Amino acid sequence: EVQLVQSGAEVKKPGESLRISCKGSGYSFTTYWITWVRQMPGKGLEWMGRIDATDSSTDYSPSFQGHVTISVDKSISTAYLQWNSLKASDTAMYYCARLYGHYFDNWGQGTLVTVSS
Amino acid sequence: SYELTQPPSVSVSPGQTARITCFGHALPNQYAYWYQQKPGQAPLLVIYKDSERSSGIPERFSGSSSGTTVTLTISGVQAEDEADYYCQSTESSGSPHVVFGGGTKLTVL
């Protein structure tokens, strides 16, 4: 069974750094890209970017380029989403998902990030 | 930037047919995909490549495409179908950038 298991909820202060994770299992991790999706409170889904689990090449949405970093450690089948300096506006649920061609066939359970002073 | 447009809300009574549309200028040339999201849950793939039903999705869910509009149809709506539905596509086959529609809240009256 394909599973993507994300790290737990985080509460941070503005200006702090953060890295959340997404561990894949039940499939060949390096065969697929992993993508990250943001969902702000009460709002819709926003595609942030993707990473090739084989060679770590990335593509970012223009809306998120330069604000977050997506990385992967294929030795432990884990993808990451990282911020160097959080803002209150980063408060959201973040989902990872497996990219199958042009769509997302399996999703993580989500990681809630709260940024508040 | 490329956009997909969905109605904010659709309401139907149980047993009726719900139709949720998604408009995008590139949809004649790009596949669309549909996701269902219930409160507190991650999105779930419902339809891929315009009209293919994902594994485990009930037959009452179907998808269709006509020009710049794709439609998710739920026949014989049940209370458990109440959820947010999102369409998703890309602007071109060579573009890695994914776009989601704004989402449609399906209310079962």
Image (tube, rainbow, N blue to C red):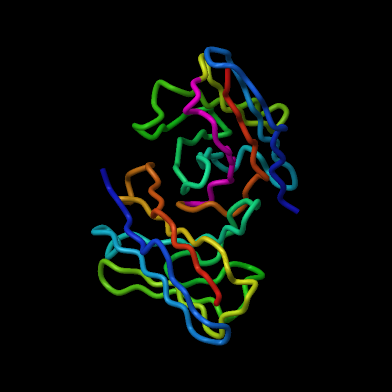
Q: Is residue B6 above or below residue A99?
A: below
- Point 50% across, 68% down: residue: B106
Q: Is residue B18 left or right of residue B21?
A: right
Q: How many marks?
A: 0
Could you tell me residue B37's position as x and y percent? 57, 58
On-image quarter of the C terminus of chain B: bottom right
Magenta range: A87-101
Query: Which is the main secondary structure of the residues drawn in magenta?
Result: strand
- Point 76% across, 54% down: residue: A1
The answer to which of A61 and A43 lies nearer the viewer is A43
Q: Is residue A76 left or right of residue B14?
A: right
Q: Is residue A10 above or below residue B79?
A: above
- Point 54% across, 31% down: residue: A91
Could you tell me residue A34's position as x and y percent? 56, 39
In which image quadrant can residue A116 be found? top right
Q: Is residue B43 left or right of residue A68?
A: right
In which image quadrant can residue A16 be found? top right
- Point 38% across, 42% down: residue: B96
Q: Is residue A86 above or below residue B104?
A: above
Q: Is residue A103 above or below residue B106?
A: above
In which image quadrant can residue B56 be found? bottom right
Could you tell me residue A95's position as x and y percent? 59, 41
Could you tell me residue A2's position as x and y percent? 71, 50
Q: Residue B31 lies in magenta, yes or no? A: no
Q: Residue A95 lies in magenta, yes or no? A: yes
On-image quarter of the N terminus of chain B: top left
Q: Is residue B104 left or right of residue A30?
A: left
